[in-house]
Amino acid sequence: MEPVDRLVDSDDTVDVIAEDVPGYEFYVWYGVTAPAKTSPGAGPVFVVETVKGTFEVETYPNEAPKTVEHILALVKRNFYNGHRVHRQVPGFVAQFGDPLSRDVSKKHLWGTGGSMYAIGVNEASPLHTHETGAVATAHPGDPRQADSQMYIMLAPRHNLDGDYTVFANIAYGKKGATEAEVVANGVGTPPPSDNR
């Protein structure tokens, strides 16, 4: 996978289906080959391909078995293909996984959709926290209602620990990447340095 300067940045526009729209269309598939490096205890890897590049996500099935099983089942049936990043907050998160984001005319609803099958449990673990590069499930207020939407942390936010299930990490071969590493691997745009 080639490092790409910026894969997820909702401030830009990209030509998708013959019109400029915010957000990036992307495709996700189950990784057939293992990444060059993974973290200890990491499980299956899936690949996210955006119109600006590709990155790998390693999962943690030991700590979040139902969440990993649910997300991988969606990946294997191509559920995420054609989705757009519907939320990106510099220095915080990039979020995707809403099937409504395929339709620009439904932009006012982006962030409200899912696969219609909630995971049903909160598998938040103290072993995997909201570090930069962590991937967690989003939910509408109850962790048991998490479904297909997930977000990638662009900076540490430990106030989210315990309320959201961190089920994966961007595959760097270590936990707790710096925001610069996330950006270098194409997952966001860093905030201005004076906003730190």
Image (cartoon, helix red, strand yellow):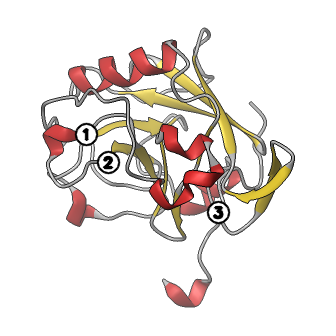
Q: Position of residue 51 (x, y in %)?
A: 77, 41
| Badge 1 amino acid | Ala
- Identify the residue at image location x=50%, y=61%: 108
Query: Would you place residue 62 above or below residue 113 in this image?
Result: above
Label 2 and label 1: CA atoms lie apart by: 6 Å
Which residue position is annotated with label 3?
A: 10
Residue 122 placement: quadrant:
top left
- Identify the residue at image location x=69%, y=49%: 24
User: Seen in the image, is 122 located left or right of residue 6?
Assistant: left
89 or 176: nearer the viewer: 89
9 or 100: nearer the viewer: 100
Is residue 87 in view from this perspective? yes
Decide which of tag 1 and tag 3 comes sooner along the chain: 3
Which residue position is annotated with label 2?
A: 138
* Quarter the N terminus occupies: top right
Crowding at dot 2, Cα within 10 Å, few <14 / some 14-19 / many 20+, comes out as many
- Please report contact status of discs 2 and 1: CB closer than 8 Å, yes or no: yes
Residue 189 placement: quadrant:
bottom right
